[in-house]
Amino acid sequence: MIPVLIVLNAGSSSLKFQVFDMLDNAEPRLVWKGLYEGLGGAAHFVIRHARGADLDEMSWNSGEEFGHEEALAHLISWLREHQEGRKLAAIGHRVVHGGQSFSRPVLVDDSIVQALEALVPLAPLHQPHNLEPIRIMRRRLPGMPQVACFDTAFHQTQSDIASLFALPREMREGGVRRYGFHGLSYDYIASVLADYDPRLAEGRVIVAHLGNGASLCALKDGVSVATTMGFSALDGLPMGTRCGAIDAGVVFYMLREMKLTPEEAESVLYKKSGLLGVSGISNDMRMLRSKATTNADAKRAIDLFAYRITREIGSLVAALGGIDGLVFTAGIGENDVATRAEVMAGLTWAGLTMDESANRIGGPRISTGSGPSAWVIPTDEELVIARQTRSVLESTQAKLAS
Ligand code: AMP
């Protein structure tokens, strides 16, 4: 039997999953990947082979009460029917917040579940959805090892100063500090830098994770020294629907003068801002690009996005004391030729020169000259969760055996 692990990434109405074979002495190998969408309403399931061909698909109508519980029950029985000589060995979960105490992935038990629940106030819009499948799987598959892998953990290497807000000391002691997110993506990029150029792995590299969520991370010797996201996943760059860094005074104005409730203000900042809010059209970069030549609001949203990325890269170059490499990743970073060109155009002062034809075909190297280099590197957060889950599993088994 080949041991397999499932990687789960749960949102409020979606559940993404990937299934990996764990072969001896080899990287976890993707077998299937899929998605449940529309959970709690008209749900839809699709599963594909690793190489991309659709394998199975199913829909439920909105009267059928199909939520996360039902999706996981369906996934377990689908896998049992199709497992062909495979045996489930562990489940790895993406968990957005590991707080101050979790600097590495962890095997889940009762006390860990409690500790992760205590972190819900730090990420109220994401953490509860991440914890739900952990609880469900503990009930449905008691004894199955489950590992929580954190988006914050990669940034625990940052210095005290880099993670500090200029707030009263007791607030920091109460956990109000910069945590940083997208750590699973940065972990993956750091792990493959040497394959692209060994000098990057030991150099000063800025990674631009530009997807629907967006942030930058400054890496030195492959570890995080600074990032644009802070206490919450709202900080830093403008995103699909999130505002990025704003003056905290705006929040008081929203509450006091605009008479918004905290929930309404939160919804504006998380769900109605960013590319969507500025354009008034969409959070989808493809849509905005298609309208940018004729619609001034679409163009303004894109221009602000590129401007903020360029400015924040400048700040991270200062934090690193220079730059050896710039990496674009995630949906926009990997695919949007124009965003890469706009950002690079603002970085000639840092010695970065765009290779336009390489940029058009997606690199991987998109810069010319002997100065700092720029790259397009596809990220793979699920593979990092699979690697981390396997490593926790193996070290637990080793401890039990000794
Ligand atoms: P992610 O959250 O990483 O899936 O990224 C989602 C973002 O990537 C959305 O803004 C998409 O519009 C954008 N995106 C995906 N594919 C493309 C593409 N081919 N060109 C431009 N933007 C893209």
Image (cartoon, grey):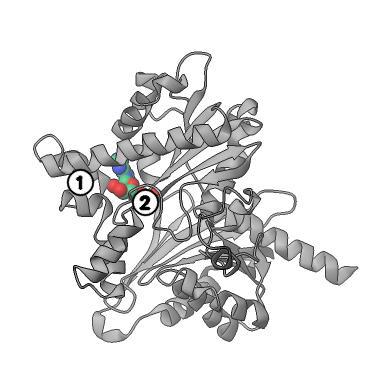
Q: Residue 53: where, in percent of width, then height? A: 40, 52
Secondary structure of the residue carrying numbered label 1: helix
Residue furthest top in the image: 369
The residue under label 2 is 245
> Tag count in the figure?
2
Residue 196: quadrant of the picture: top right
Mark in front: 1 vs 2: 2
Above or below for 31 versus 199: below
Residue 29 visible at all: no
Answer with left or right where residue 342 lies relative to residue 131: left
**Numbered circle sitting on residue 82:** none
Q: Residue 217: where, in percent of width, then height? A: 51, 43
Foreground: 389 or 338?
A: 338
For the residues marked 1 and 2, what is the alpha-carbon distance in whole angstroms? 24 Å
- Name the residue rendered at 31%, 29% in the picture: 342
Q: Residue 349: where, in percent of width, then height? A: 42, 20
Respond yes or no on whether mark 2 lies under 8 Å from ligand 1: no
Respond yes or no on whether mark 1 lies under 8 Å from ligand 1: yes
Q: Are marks 1 and 2 in contact (CB under 8 Å)?
A: no
Secondary structure of the residue carrying numbered label 2: loop
The residue under label 1 is 287
Task: Please state, as top left, top right, bottom left or bottom right, where the N terminus lies in the image.
Answer: bottom right
Mark 1 burial class by Cα count in 10 Å: few <14, some 14-19, many 20+: few
